[in-house]
Image (cartoon, helix red, strand yellow):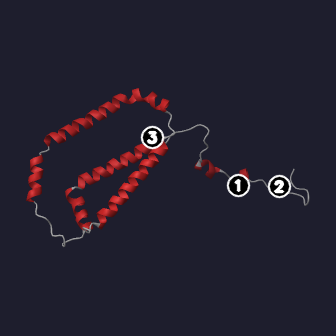
Amino acid sequence: MLGAEFVAMILVIVYVGAVAVLFLFVVMMLDINIAVIRQGFLKYMWAGLLVGGILLAELITVFAAWKMSDSAEMLRAAPAPDPNAMSNTEAIGQILYTDYVYLFQASGIILLVAMIGSIVLTHRTRTGVRKQVISEQNARRPIDTLEVVKVESGKGLQ
């Protein structure tokens, strides 16, 4: 009703994609061996605590330096743009790639790290599972794999 067709479609795509990724991640994680994960927990706990401490210090620094009153003043002082001047898609693109370009890029990096992390967490070697080895397949020669057998008529192979 507001003419925000682009925002409506993006919301649908993002939320459907997020739910699909969540289900996929849960299904991939169901077959995990907890004992193996717990063995490496204490080994890498110090690194996790160090990274967590650095992130916490950065968040505290950012929130301590942030002034709410300046943001509120800026919002009140900014004039409303003419709604007929540009389309919704152009307005969103203008805002994303000018005012919020760093946040937009940071969200992309966070999604990339999450995707790589989910792949790393679920990619494991399992015994008893046969995998395709492309180099071995490419190295095979027809003479090693084919055998021409002359079969006499009416006798068949024995």
Name the amino acid, label 2: Val
The label shown at residue 121 is 3
Distance from Cα at disc 2 to Cα at disc 1:
15 Å
Q: Which residue is mark 2?
A: 149
Is disc 3 placed on a helix, strand or loop?
Answer: helix
Question: Horizontal and vertical percent for residue 3?
Answer: 26, 69
Distance from Cα at disc 3 to Cα at disc 1:
39 Å
Is disc 1 placed on a helix, strand or loop?
Answer: helix
Question: Horizontal and vertical percent for residue 72?
Answer: 11, 52
Farthest residue to the bottom: give it: 84
Name the amino acid, label 1: Pro
Residue mark closest to the camera, 2 vs 3: 3
N-terminal-most mark, 2 or 1: 1
- Which of the image's four quarters has the N terminus? bottom left
Q: Is the residue under label 1 in contact with that under label 3 (CB below 8 Å)?
A: no
N-terminal-most mark, 3 or 1: 3
* Left or right of 134 in this view: 35: left
Tell me the residue at 68%/53% (across/down): 141
Name the amino acid, label 3: Leu
Q: Which residue is mark 1?
A: 142
Question: Horizontal and vertical percent for residue 114?
Answer: 37, 46
* Left or right of 26 in this view: 67: left
Is disc 2 placed on a helix, strand or loop?
Answer: loop
Q: Is the residue under label 3 in contact with that under label 2 (CB below 8 Å)?
A: no
